[in-house]
Image (tube, grey):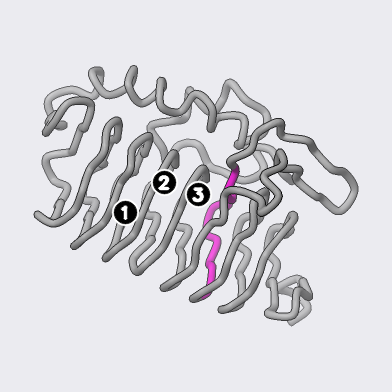
Amino acid sequence: MMTIKDLYDLDHTLAKDYLLQFTYPWEALKGLKDFILTLGPTLGADYEEVSEHVWVHKTAKVFPSAYLGAPCIIGPETEVRHCAFIRGSALVGANCVVGNSVELKNVILFDHVQTPHYNYVGDSILGYYSHMGAGSITSNVKSDKKLVVVHGADEEIETGIKKFGAMLGDYVEVGCNAVCNPGTVIGPHSNVYPTSCVRGVVPPYSIWKDNGTVASKEER
């Protein structure tokens, strides 16, 4: 339930071959910068290198006030809106929205991901058609600065990394002003209530309610 194959349809990202090297998605975070630097020059004529190590598809719309830090890739038909801040090491897929005052850092956004309003997404992977409501964020460093541990129902996995936000499976909906704590893994087709404080592993086809109760969608 926490592996790449459990969480994602890899046909919806340019990182497919890269991700196939790993078992767990967070294992891909460390080498993401180097991967983007290698991938960028191979993208072909449909992409323009608008500044050093910043590749933008010709059909993408990047607003003048947005900042694109290197290295990053912006996919086809994607919108990067006013005052978006892409700090670097960001692979943004096709038909995505990176909205007003959104900050991205060391992330993979699969195709059709929406981070439209005041989101912070760091050291995270967001699956196909996942959506983060206004003000929802991924918290990527523990307050005690210790290495992140993924807490599943039946096992705990020591990741060995300090910066790890959230892994959102395909079709995940995160409600407004929710916080995904370091090491959060949300299974495909799951929903998170607005203003929730999420931690651990949320099974697929589940609902994380605002008091931390998790219900299956079939039970609601």
Residue 149 included in the magenta stretch of the image: no
Q: Residues within 10 Å of mark 3 (few under 14, many from 20)?
A: many
Q: Residues within 10 Å of mark 2 (few under 14, many from 20)?
A: many
* Disc with the residue nearer the chain's start (3 vs 2): 2
* Disc with the residue nearer the chain's start (3 vs 1): 1
Q: Give the side of residue 108 with respect to residue 52, left or right.
A: right
Residue corresponding to mark 1: 96
Give yes or no for contact between labels 3 and 2 (Cβ–Cβ under 8 Å).
no
Extreme residue toward the front, this view: 144
- x and y percentages locating residue 98 in the rendered image: 30, 57
Name the disc covering residue 127, or none.
3
- x and y percentages locating residue 119 in the rendered image: 41, 63
The residue that appears at 63% across and 74% down in the rendered structure is: 196
Give yes or no for contact between labels 2 and 1 (Cβ–Cβ under 8 Å).
yes
The alpha-carbon separation of the residues under discs 3 and 2 comes to 7 Å
The residue that appears at 18% across and 53% down in the rendered structure is: 66
The alpha-carbon separation of the residues under discs 2 and 1 comes to 8 Å
What is the magenta range? 164-175
The residue that appears at 67% across and 43% down in the rendered structure is: 6
The residue that appears at 70% across and 78% down in the rendered structure is: 209
**The quarter of the displayed image where residue 14 is located:** top left
Q: Is residue 167 visible?
A: no
Quadrant occupied by the C terminus = bottom right
Of the residues shown, which amino acid type is indicated by label 1? Cys
Q: Nearer the viewer, residue 200 or 9?
A: 200
Residue corresponding to mark 2: 109
Secondary element under disc 3, as helix, strand or loop, is loop
* Disc with the residue nearer the chain's start (2 vs 1): 1
